[in-house]
Image: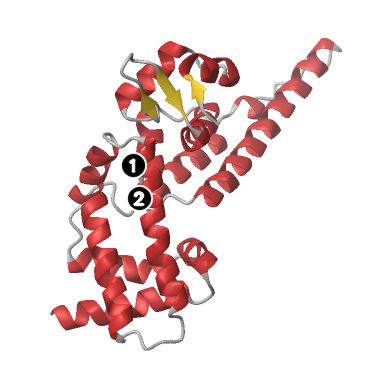
Amino acid sequence: MRLSIGALSRLSGVSVRALHHYDQLGLLHPSEVTDAGYRYYDDTAIERLWQILFYRELDFPLRDIAEILSSPGFDRMRALSEHRALLLQKRDRLDKLIELVSNAMKGETTMEFKPFDTGELDAMREQYAEEAKARWGNTEAYRESARRAAKWTDADRARMEQRSNEIFSGFAALVGADPADARVQILVERWKAFIGESYYDCTNEILAGLGQMYVADERFTKNLDRFGAGTAKLMSDAIAVYCAKAK
């Protein structure tokens, strides 16, 4: 699909002015800008807007949305699961408010204030936002990642996703091999270089932390094992070998 900015505005309900604003913030760049200045959005950009609107529906600030979507650890399926959980919580609160108003219309007045309380919803929202940036949010690595992400085009994102998937698939094809195997270690080197080129300076210390996270956090394990069972474990073990040799 290829939509002009006007067509995307009509499809999504997001104003053209807002789409320009998203571009300025580095939140959503057009996939193509013609010599005449016309802006077009491809499937990748449209899906990114879909994710943005989910978070906007849950009242996330645009800055937080940009950080979450640009996080190296962003997991689309996990994000959708969180969206659903938050929306269900939001619906439950609205249902209770509707019930309260309906009872009041019947003359049934009760001093019930619980439905007005947004504390639980706010806590869930804050938890999910913080988890998305907890690993790097207070580090120079995360800030550098955010700075670089602000300059990405959707074509850049698609290209980086393709490159990372190729590396993950390479690890998956070698599951069962010795983590110290030269072929596996070459992939570790490629992965480290990819992170450094795309996100932030990936020191061996950071790389070692990532390797541990791939098996310690089941969400990362599940995401990597989409390429083949055991991929996360092999990456983790191979990174440990790589970093140990570098000491």
Q: Decide which of 87, 20 is in the foreground and name it.
A: 20
* 212 shown above or below 127: below
Q: Amino acid at mark 2?
A: Met
Q: Are marks 1 and 2 in contact (CB under 8 Å)?
A: yes
Q: Residue at x 63, y 41 (%)?
A: 84
Q: How is the image coloured?
A: secondary structure
- In the picture of the structure, the residue carrying the numbered disc 2 is 160
Marks counted in the figure total 2
Q: Reply above or below: 24 against 76.
A: above
Q: Tell me the SS state at disc 1.
A: helix
Q: Is residue 6 left or right of residue 197?
A: right
| Type of amino acid at the residue the image marks with label 1 | Asp
Residue 140: percent from left, percent from top: 18, 48
Q: Secondary structure at mark 2?
A: helix
Is residue 79 at least partly visible in the picture? Answer: yes
Q: Is residue 145 above or below residue 187?
A: above
Quadrant in the picture for residue 211: bottom left
Q: CA distance from mark 1 to mark 2?
A: 6 Å
Q: Quadrant of the C terminus?
A: bottom left
Mark 1 neighbour class, 10 Å CA radius: few under 14, some 14 to 19, many 20 or more: some
What residue do we see at 24% from left, 47% from top?
138
Q: Is residue 199 visible?
A: no
Of 28 and 205, the residue lying toward us: 28
Q: Position of residue 14 (x, y in %)?
A: 51, 17
**Which residue carries the number 1 mark?**
156
In the rendered image, which quarter is residue 67 located in?
top left
In front of the other: 196 or 214: 196
